[in-house]
Image: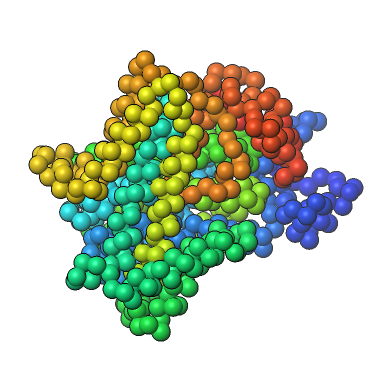
Amino acid sequence: MPRTSGRSHQDPKGLTLAMQLGKSKDGTPATTNAAAHDGDTAIPPRPEDERLPAKLLGLYGLQHILTMYAGAVAPALVIGGAAGLSPADQGILVSGALLVAGIATLLQTLGPWRTGAQLPIVVAASFVPVGAMTTIATDQGLPVVFGASLVGGLFALCLTPFFGQLVRFFPPAVTGSIITVIGLSLMPVAAGWIVNNNPSGHPSLSDIGLAAATLALVLLFSRVLPGLLGRVAILLGLIAGTLIALPLGKTDFSAVSDGAFFALGSPLHFGMPEFELAAILTMCVIMLVVLTEGASHIIAVAEITGSKVDAKRISAGLRADVSASIIGPIFNTTPGSSFAQNIGLLALTKIKSRFVVASGAGILIVLGLFPVLGRVVAAIPMPVLGGAGLVLFGTVAASGIRTLGKVDFDNNLNLILVATSLGFGILPMAVPDFYEGFPGPIATVLHSGIVGAAIVAITLNICFNVIGRGKAPQPSAEIDRDELKTAGPGEAKYTEAADAAYRSGSSDGKRPSGGGEADGKHPSGHGEAGGNAGADGGEPAGEEGELSAKSD
């Protein structure tokens, strides 16, 4: 893919002056991205390579961090609570999650060493493995969690060169079922936060009141705050709920002063990783879902930015996602994946520069170098976390349900696939000891529910839709840009588009069948996918706004 030269060209219409003021002629953020030249022929720049003034890079980068912060630290709080860690040790998990998120996001946006799609994608701790890792942390401790994450990451790394051939095994019926189970499996965590270790086993009235107040504030902020502020409603709700808890004596920040103020990541703070077969098998299954989530998000971001992607670029992006699973255990954190919240922010703001997200990655790295900030997060009262967690984890489940809304349930066996998968996923939640009679490794694998749902969904999809008589029609590669503006955490959409981008053998650069017209118009008639790329961000319309269907 040709790079931009960064050179300025003659600008008789005063565009250069507008850039110096930080705005383009039409009022959008100015860029310094100039077209590269090959002889006398100008090569259009990639839209994701636009360069904004430094002050705008920092501002828009901070936007991305605020959008994803609550979701990025939640897995660390869940797993740390399951492992029975002190607030100081939970702060280590939080700071490690931010540090690794910054490193992985830099790899994803800048793309060194064939690692990273060079797209504006934020990578952070994924919700997908949280349920399984909570079980492992409770039963066997964090070193086993990190050992399984490391091996699972290496397993996924080996799959990235040809994962496109496996994407067809993860249609919306499979991913929607799994993401729904992930969200439902996290609900007991939110309930446990509200109970707040009460010896009676049920929450006190004051804890219920604090959780309810936090929930009400999150809902209020979501309803009344405009645009970008509404997208950080959960973060604002956590802050407001903590302020309410202060005069009630429900906060304890005494542990904030424990431990180092600044540290270079606290590597291997909980000891060397340990390797248990059942935990490793569980994580390998989960990493298949993480890869699917990552591939679908790369396709979605390419659609928003009007960028071209091919098999090599998607594989490079998946390697950046997987890097969080490999680097994470060293810095005490868990597998990562691209964040759907930030994809929604891209669609909302139309700021396509990967360097904006790279600047946000720098902010994450700085935050991760200060464990004291992690201890502040760990000191948030549990009922406050529980009230916000009902929305945060519920959004994960709702994202899965919305993905299921794209499934064709007519004249095929997808309904049976989804029903059976959800049944196996909910069994361990309804009856926690259901698998206790099974041999140890099998019980560990199935106890998470997420793995059970994934195994059943993948197997039934192969039987019903790949080799069976109930094969569903080939799904469309259409992507609804309006839906991306409300993307939620854990949302693994558009696997059908990823599959088409990998498998199409067309050589004319046009979208796969079902993905829109050759002129770049959105197939739903909105005309945004490519035809409006120039109107939104100054890039040429048409071919540059289309997904490249070429495969390596």
Quarter assignment of residue 380: bottom left
Q: Nearer the viewer, residue 516 or 500?
A: 516
The residue depicted at 63 percent of the width and 61 percent of the height is 226
The extreme top residue here reads 469
Residue 416 visible from this viewpoint: yes
The residue depicted at 80 percent of the width and 31 percent of the height is 40
Q: Nearer the viewer, residue 470 or 438?
A: 470
* Residue 181, placed above or below residue 268: above
- Side of 38 relative to 510 (left or right): right
Residue 318 visible from this viewpoint: no
The residue depicted at 34 percent of the width and 29 percent of the height is 417
- Side of 88 relative to 313 (left or right): left
* Residue 287, placed above or below residue 547: below
- Side of 304 relative to 499 (left or right): right
Give the image location of residue 515, x and y in percent.
Answer: 60, 27
Quarter placement of the N terminus: top right
Give the image location of residue 165, x and y in percent.
Answer: 42, 25
